[in-house]
């Protein structure tokens, strides 16, 4: 298991996501952003819009995705 924060993934807060893979971390961040914006937290709106754009245009988002995968791989297991 490794840990990345919302901020590590482009969001505004320090909420920690723990997961066994980078893909699980990305999915956790997507869920966190969705729930934050749905509850009225506008500080997460820009990050949520960016995440939605990535899901809609995956080929354009490979740099971000590969960067997250590299950052995750470089983290120590916790």
Image (cartoon, grey):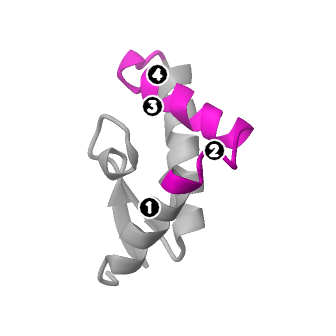
Tell whether label 3 touches label 4 (CB within 8 Å).
yes
In this rendering, is residue 77 above or below 56? below
In this rendering, is residue 44 above or below 2? above
Q: Which residue is mark 4?
A: 45
Q: Which residue is mark 3?
A: 47
Mark 3 to mark 1: distance in Å?
A: 16 Å
Mark 4 to mark 2: distance in Å?
A: 20 Å
Q: Secondary structure at mark 3?
A: helix
Mark 1 to mark 4: distance in Å?
A: 22 Å
Q: Which residue is mark 1?
A: 67
The part of the chain drawn in magenta is: 40-63
Q: Residue at x 46, y 21 (%)?
A: 45
Q: Earlier in the sequence, mark 4 or mark 2?
A: 4
Tell whether label 1 touches label 3 (CB within 8 Å).
no
Mark 4 to mark 3: distance in Å?
A: 5 Å
Q: Earlier in the sequence, mark 3 or mark 1?
A: 3
Q: Earlier in the sequence, mark 1 or mark 4?
A: 4
Q: Which residue is mark 2?
A: 60
Residue 58: give x, y in percent of width and height. 69, 47
Q: Residue at x 51, y 54 (%)?
A: 63
Residue 35: give x, y in percent of width and height. 54, 32
Mark 3 to mark 2: distance in Å?
A: 16 Å
Residue 41: give x, y in percent of width and height. 41, 20
């Amino acid at each position: 298991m490794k840990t990345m924060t919302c901020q590590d993934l482009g969001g505004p807060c320090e909420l920690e996501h723990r997961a066994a893979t980078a893909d699980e971390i990305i999915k956790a961040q997507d869920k966190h952003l969705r729930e934050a914006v749905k509850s009225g937290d506008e500080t997460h709106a820009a990050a949520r819009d960016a995440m939605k754009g990535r899901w809609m245009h995956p080929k354009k988002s490979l740099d971000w995705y590969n960067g997250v995968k590299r950052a995750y791989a470089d983290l120590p297991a916790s």
